[in-house]
Amino acid sequence: MSVIIVKKDLCDGCGICLDYCPYGAIEIVDNAAWINEKCTLCSACIEPCPLNAIVMEHGPLEVPKLDKTAWSGIWIFAEQRNAKISTVVYELIGAGRKLADITGEKVTAVLLGNDMEPAARDLIHFGADEVIYVDDQRLRQFNDGPYAAVLTDLIKKRRPSVVLAGATFMGRSFIPMVASQVETGLTADCTMLEIDPETGDLLQTRPAFGGNILATIVCPAHRPQMATVRHKVMLPAERDETRKGEVHIIRELDGVDLSGRTEVLEVVEEVMDTVNLAEADVIVAGGRGVGGPDGFKVLEELAILLGGALGASRSVVDAGWIPYSHQVGQTGKTVKPKLYIACGISGAVQHLAGMQTSDVIVAINKDPDAPIFEVATYGLVGDLFQVVPEIIRAVKAARKGA
């Protein structure tokens, strides 16, 4: 543990350090500098002191003692929308199954909803050893307060070792609340999960610094180990009708406040002619090369023709050409379609981080040196407004011929 202290026998209260502290964390008391609770240990005050009266001292790091044997189980938050299990859940179960096979623990799916018993039982067929299904009318629609209250209560009572959730709008909304309430850490947007063979701790890997490096994070002194995982980066579990497991249905929530501070009055879904981006097998995406909002019309036509979704790079979303819900990349959605057609996208590392695992990547760009061609399966150097209409005509002609 580190701390900044003032050596009172050396300090003469000159006040020079006050001008260098960006947080107002230093006061002059009784002709000597005093460090208050605003200090962030930035150390900006140390070097300017002419008397070397301000120093940083380092003590041993105090790590809380943890009985890891008191925590057991790999939990998967089974996200649902409109009583339908989200596909990211099957990816999480697949990942959780691999972890559990190493640790020897159970995989438990936790489902919050109403009138979803068949869906709860079906999670067993996808690899869960057991399902905890909390059935309550007030949990039919997602509301971060009640959802956090229920999951927090379950964690405190049953003590799982690991809790995983999708890095979706839902997971990003309430899982941090749960982590705070159970006083543990949370790693967001993970792309890889492994078990440390020496300690048994969960190794949680996520992109950092705009996707330029990968950081592996551990939580050795607290439980549960919590992480949200990006959609489309893990292989989904396969359904097996022969699998058996237990389903625990909870209808009485003693001591859990489900009132929340907000009330869901209505869920308004964005009206789109193309399918959901995260679920799409085909994505047609546009970047700066589309020239403006109208440039997406021809891309949307191709996306609809192929039964796919319309994607975009961050630059065009920031420019207001298309809504954020279409953004692919480090700060948007991670996708893994069978076919990704990148039109007028240069291929910044932030965008590549969200789509480079696609099965087939077709890049269309006028710049032959665009970075997107480095990850493309097929590259077409040319004007997208000439190439894409030709693709549309060819697809239509092929379908007529069939």
Image (cartoon, rainbow, N blue to C red):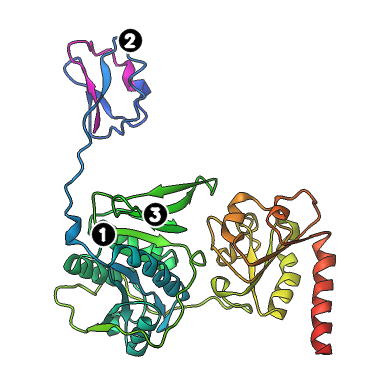
Badges 2 and 3: C-beta atoms under 8 Å apart? no
In the image, taking residue 127 as reference, residue 383 lies left or right, namely right
Looking at the rendered structure, the kind of residue marked 1 is Pro
Q: CA distance from mark 2 to mark 1?
A: 48 Å
Badges 2 and 1: C-beta atoms under 8 Å apart? no
Residue 93, image x and y in percent?
Answer: 39, 72
| Mark drawn on residue 224 | 1
Q: Is residue 362 above or below residue 22?
A: below
Residue at the disc numbered 3: 204
Q: Residue at x 24, y 84 (%)?
A: 249
Q: Nearer the viewer, mark 2 or mark 3?
A: 3
Residue 315, image x and y in percent?
Answer: 64, 54
Within-10-Å neighbours for mark 2: few <14, some 14–19, many 20+: few
Q: Is residue 142 above or below residue 366?
A: below
Q: CA distance from mark 2 to mark 3?
A: 45 Å
Looking at the rendered structure, the kind of residue marked 3 is Gln
Q: CA distance from mark 1 to mark 3?
A: 13 Å
Quadrant where the image shows the N terminus: top left
Q: Bounds of the magenta span?
A: 1-18
